[in-house]
Image (cartoon, rainbow, N blue to C red):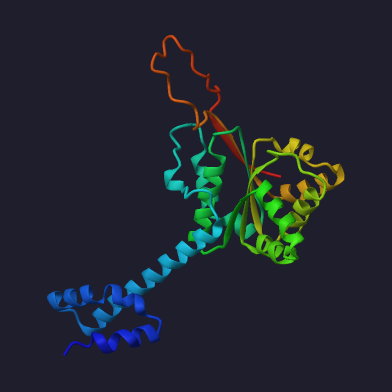
Amino acid sequence: MNPMPDLTPMLKQLRLSGILDSIEVRNRQAIENKLSYMDFLATIVTDEIARRNQKKLATALRRANFRNQKTLEEFDFSYNPNINRALVMELASCRFMAEKVGVFIIGPCGTGKSHLAQALGHCAIRAGHSVLFTSAAKMLAQLNAARATNGYERHFAKITGVDLLIIDDFGLKPLRPSQDEDFHDVISERYEKKSTIVTSNLDTPEWTDAFPNRILAEATIDRLRHGAYTVVLEGKSYRSPRPAANASKIAGPKSPKNDTLKGGEKH
């Protein structure tokens, strides 16, 4: 007698319906390989755990709101060969999150800042941490919009509560009055509690220029810099145009001479 008609609703009641995806295949394998009942049970339980872990990972990646699914495995270290790979791998271990300090990723456009930041976010998710990726402009616009609908506190709690907040493109646009206050409040709330990654085209001494209020700028950046690791990307842009068909007659853009990554600096 086939037990599946009776087994299916019971598995669903126990919230083990994922087992149905593989149980028939595993049953045939068990018969062919003469597995014991315990070995068969271990196999389908292992399948269920793997399925749940995959579902959990997919949910965490979706909630992270990454711009695109960039991973460290896809990062082309050979493109700018002077990159300090050991430093990047150290950050990928997420030990900086245990320290509750931040990471600055600084460099010109196209050198891989956003890719690297999202890749570190992927590493954090795989290690079981919650992550949120957003641009500075989007984060501040959403906070302002939430204030208008009486949802500011809830959205503020979402931003400040994640284990790793990644703020992309800080300083790309100057902050307006009230935006600098919101940015300060986010950083102040996370200070010494959670880790934050910030990417920027500006060197850190220039960050105060993005704030309309100089005093608020110094207070905010002082908290950001405390214990933070700084990674500086210098090199060719990944977005450089392809060589022209008649390259001998049409001069292409010159690439920067220095292709280095300076890292490990702690403030």
Residue 221 % position (x, y): 76, 46
- In the displayed structure, does residue 30 sit left or right of residue 235? left
Residue at position x 50%, y 54% in the image: 122
Which residue is most to the front?
149
Residue at position x 72%, y 47% in the image: 225
The one nearer the camera, 231 or 216, is 216
Which residue is most to the top?
249
Residue 18 % position (x, y): 35, 75
Q: Is residue 87 visible?
A: no
Quadrant of the frame with the N terminus: bottom left
The one nearer the camera, 105 or 211, is 211
- In the displayed structure, does residue 189 sit left or right of residue 213? left
Residue at position x 41%, y 10% in the image: 248
Residue 15 % position (x, y): 40, 81
Residue 124 % position (x, y): 53, 57
Q: Is residue 194 visible?
A: yes
Q: Is residue 158 above or below residue 250?
A: below
- In the displayed structure, does residue 198 sit left or right of residue 183? left
Q: Is residue 145 above or below residue 77?
A: below
- In the displayed structure, does residue 138 sit left or right of residue 125? right
Numbered marks: total: 0
Quadrant of the frame with the C terminus: top right
